[in-house]
Structure formats: structure tokens, C-alpha cells
């Protein structure tokens, strides 16, 4: 199971070279594909990767050598990656975004942050954890989740 594999890789530290290799392969693949068709890809970043010293430099180096247009890559970062040191997370995210890299918060609603904390983060996207909104009284499971009602609630809560 992927969750088991990722957990073991995180615990042993193997997630760092695995994550770097995945990003390298994604960049090379994207460079190849975009010769024929312009697409965007997302790459998950583990909490351990995001927290490591030199993370931003490593990402920028991999992107520079990978041959892909870094504006077509979105890095997906989990809530747990940023909540330990939100000030440092903001600096890292701002630096990446200044280079044109999209940043998405993955699995929002898994218990680490609130909308008020999210206001501080310079994010491009927020991916809401399906289990979180399915259990929420704001999103009854008896009603389909429609874009207008969903986004109006998020916009209202964001204000």
C-alpha cells in the first residue's frame, strides 16, 4: 500500500532521495511531453522533504537541470509540513512562488490548521480532504457538492 511505503520511507529518511528522484523524473517527463502538448503536473512533497534545510535550493536546482518549464509544475505540500513552523513555511513558499512555481496545500482539513492560519500562507491552491468535508455539517452528504455552493462557502469563510 502506498501509505505504508510512504510511512516507512519517511521514518527511515529514504523519502528524501526518493522525493528528489521523483521530482527529477517528473521534470524530465514534463519537458518531453510539453514538446508536443502543454500540460501541468503536480508533485507531492513529503513533510520531511519540505522541512529539510536547503529544500528550496534543491527544488530550484532540480527544476533548472530538468529541462521543464517550472511554471507548469505544482508542488503539493501537506498541512503537517507547514504547521510546525509557519513563518519558515511562508518564507519557503514565497521563494518558490517568486520563481513561478505553483504551491498547493494538500489534504486541508486533516486537523492541523484553520482557515485563519491559511490566510498567512501564499498558496495557489487548496485541496480539501474528501473525508473532512464529507463529515462536515456545512457539506451534507445527502446533497451533491456543487461548485458554486462549495466555493461561495470557502470565499465567505475566507473573508
Image (tube, rainbow, N blue to C red):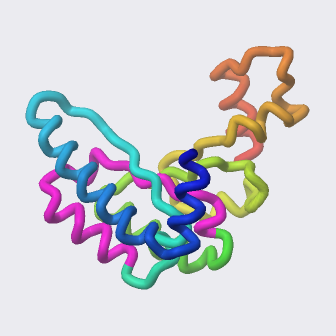
Where is 155 relative to 27, above or below?
above
- Give, as a single range, the part of the protein colored magenta: 55-82
Looking at the image, the residue that sits furthest to the bottom is 53
**Going 46% across and 60% down the picture, which residue do you hit?**
45
Q: Is residue 7 above or below residue 156?
A: below
The answer to which quarter of the image holds residue 32 is: top left
- Which of 52 and 10 lies nearest the eye of the viewer? 10
Q: Position of residue 136 (x, y in %)?
A: 86, 36
Q: Residue at x 68, y 42 (%)?
A: 129
The picture places residue 29, in percent across and down from the top left corner, at: 20, 44
Q: Is residue 61 magenta?
A: yes
Q: Is residue 142 visible?
A: yes
Q: Residue at x 54, y 68 (%)?
A: 10
| Residue positioned most to the left | 35
With respect to residue 13, does 25 lie above or below? above
- Residue 155: x, y in percent? 68, 39
Above or below, comparing residue 33 to residue 124 in the picture: above
Image-based side of 99 in relation to 150, left or right: left
Principal secondary structure, stretch drawn in magenta: helix
Figure label count: 0
Q: Nearer the viewer, residue 121 or 58?
A: 58
Q: Residue at x 48, y 49 (%)?
A: 124
> Which quadrant: the N terminus?
top right
Magenta stretch contains residue 40: no
Q: Is residue 159 visible?
A: no
State the residue lying farthest toward the right. Answer: 137
Q: Position of residue 148 (x, y in %)?
A: 66, 21
Q: Is residue 113 left or right of residue 101?
A: right
Pick the residue in front: 118 or 129: 129
Quadrant of the rendered image containing residue 47: bottom right
For residue 84, side relative to residue 63 (left or right): right
Amino acid at each position: 500500500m502506498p501509505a505504508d511505503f510512504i510511512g516507512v520511507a519517511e521514518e527511515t529518511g529514504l523519502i528524501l532521495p526518493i522525493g528528489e528522484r521523483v521530482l527529477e523524473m517528473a521534470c524530465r517527463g514534463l519537458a518531453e511531453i510539453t514538446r508536443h502538448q502543454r500540460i501541468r503536473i503536480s508533485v507531492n512533497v513529503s513533510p520531511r522533504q519540505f522541512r529539510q534545510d536547503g529544500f528550496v535550493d534543491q527544488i530550484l536546482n532540480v527544476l533548472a537541470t530538468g529541462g521543464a518549464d517550472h511554471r507548469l509544475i505544482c508542488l503539493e505540500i501537506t498541512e503537517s509540513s507547514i504547521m510546525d513552523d509557519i513563518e519558515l513555511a511562508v518564507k519557503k513558499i514565497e521563494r518558490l512562488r517568486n520563481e513561478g512555481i505553483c504551491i498547493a496545500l494538500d489534504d486541508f482539513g486533516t486537523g492541523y490548521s484553520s482557515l485563519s492560519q491559511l490566510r498567512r500562507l501564499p498558496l495557489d491552491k487548496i485541496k480539501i480532504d474528501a473525508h473532512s468535508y464529507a463529515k462536515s455539517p456545512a457539506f451534507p452528504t445527502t446533497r451533491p457538492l456543487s461548485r458554486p455552493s462549495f466555493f461561495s462557502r470557502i470565499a465567505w469563510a475566507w473573508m
